[in-house]
Amino acid sequence: MTTTAWFAPLRHLSPESFERYLEMQAVQGKHLEVYDRWSAVRLRFTAGEPATVRYVAERRIHPAPNDYYAFRQDLGWEHTGRFGDRHLWRKEYTGGRPQRFVGGRHSPVRVPA
């Protein structure tokens, strides 16, 4: 079964609020199908088993370098999609909630110099 959420990203303007919204949907067994150009208007969720999932909305101002996807996928993250300069990643987990990415100049978390 598929459910729809209309204008959800507009009701959760900060990346953290949007991430938490998606995580709460996963706990209820609603799993985001894809994140694309239509996601600002309509999010589609597929019904499934409840899961503990961490979402990260990451902004990429410049085109992604060659290792952008491979680096995150090697850490167990799944690229859910992209809309404009926003990429959405998810990772199912147990135990403590995974942190945001650490790394490059445009990462949400900076590595100390």
Image (cartoon, rainbow, N blue to C red):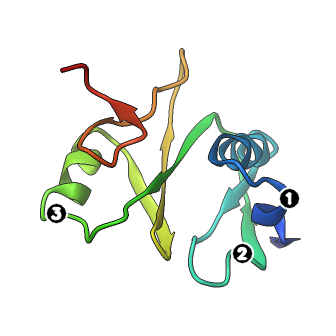
Q: Are marks 1 and 2 in contact (CB under 8 Å)?
A: no
Q: Residue at x 48, y 71 (%)?
A: 82
Image quadrant in which the C terminus is located: top left
Q: Whole-Å distance between the Cαs marked 1 and 2? A: 10 Å
Label disc, if present, on residue 40 of the rendered structure: 2
Q: Are marks 1 and 3 in contact (CB under 8 Å)?
A: no
- Amino acid carrying label 3: it is Pro
Q: Whole-Å distance between the Cαs marked 3 and 2? A: 25 Å
Q: Earlier in the sequence, mark 1 or mark 2?
A: 1
SS for tag 2? loop
Does residue 108 appear left or right of residue 21 in this picture? left
Vertical side of 69 occupied by 17: above or below: above
- Amino acid carrying label 1: it is Arg
Q: Residue at x 84, y 71 (%)?
A: 7
Does residue 52 appear left or right of residue 71 in this picture? right
Q: Earlier in the sequence, mark 3 or mark 2?
A: 2
In this view, the residue farthest toward the front is 113
Does residue 83 appear left or right of residue 73 in this picture? right
In the depicted view, which residue is nearer to us: 77 or 37?
A: 37
Q: Which residue is mark 1?
A: 11
Q: Whole-Å distance between the Cαs marked 1 and 3? A: 31 Å
Q: Which residue is mark 3?
A: 65
- Amino acid carrying label 2: it is Ala
Q: State the image coordinates of residue 47 (x, y, percent, origin top left).
A: 76, 60
Q: State the image coordinates of residue 54 (x, y, percent, origin top left).
A: 56, 38
Q: Residue at x 59, y 39 (%)?
A: 53
Q: State the image coordinates of residue 18 (x, y, percent, origin top left).
A: 71, 50
Q: Earlier in the sequence, mark 1 or mark 3?
A: 1
